[in-house]
Image (cartoon, rainbow, N blue to C red):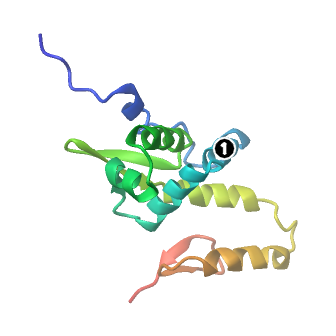
Amino acid sequence: MAIASMPSPAVASHFNADLPRDGMTFKHALSAFHALSQPTRLEIFRLLMAREPEGAPAGLIAEMVEGPHNTVSQHLSVLARAGLIRGDRQGRSIIYRADVGVMGTLMSFMLTDCCHGHPEACAPVIAALAGHCDCDVVVSKKSSNPKKKKT
């Protein structure tokens, strides 16, 4: 009798986070903040953000955060269920990546109605966010959609 090749339930949860792509709700924001409120999970998420777009396998993540593999796997599950990371199977490995789009949606959710019609009130927050990004992105003044600089 052949056994179907299926990922274990813990691994399967890494593939289908229940997060809307068109906007953030209070429920999803709270889930994301809860996931990030634990020090090791925050460290893992920051590590994966720094490794975008390549990502990292679970074993390497465990080494980098100096955590036991089974504990790191649980942390990855919490982050995945919150929609902050995703796992992509590559052969026998799963490569984890931060979901940058979800993080952008979460930041937008936090800044919604930030300035009540006074953009200068939010300017320091937006400048601080832009100042911490070491990437080649420009935000148009007409649109809040980031665009890659042409080199």
Judge whether 140 appears above or below 109 on screen: below
Residue 77: x %, y % from top left: 48, 38
Rendered-image quadrant of the C terminus: bottom left
Please give the name of the residue rendered at 62% of the width and 81% of the height, measured from the top-left corner.
Answer: 131
Residue 31: x %, y % from top left: 65, 41
Q: Which image quadrant for residue 103? A: bottom right
Asked whether 2 or 47 is in front, the reply is 47
Q: Is residue 59 left or right of residue 132?
A: left
Judge whether 149 appears above or below 23 on screen: below
Residue 121: x %, y % from top left: 85, 75
Please give the name of the residue rendered at 65% of the width and 78% of the height, measured from the top-left corner.
Answer: 142
Q: Is residue 65 left or right of residue 106?
A: left
Binning the other alpha carbons within 10 Å of mark 1 as few (below 14), some (14 to 19) or many (20 upward) gives some
Judged from the image, the secondary structure of the residue bearing numbered disc 1 is: helix
* Residue found farthest to the left: 1
Q: Which image quadrant for residue 82? A: top right
Amino acid type of the residue that numbered disc 1 sits on in the rendered structure: His
Rendered-image quadrant of the N terminus: top left
Q: Which residue is mark 1?
A: 34
- Count up the numbered dots: 1
Please give the name of the residue rendered at 66% of the width and 44% of the height, measured from the top-left corner.
Answer: 34
Asked whether 54 or 45 is in front, the reply is 45
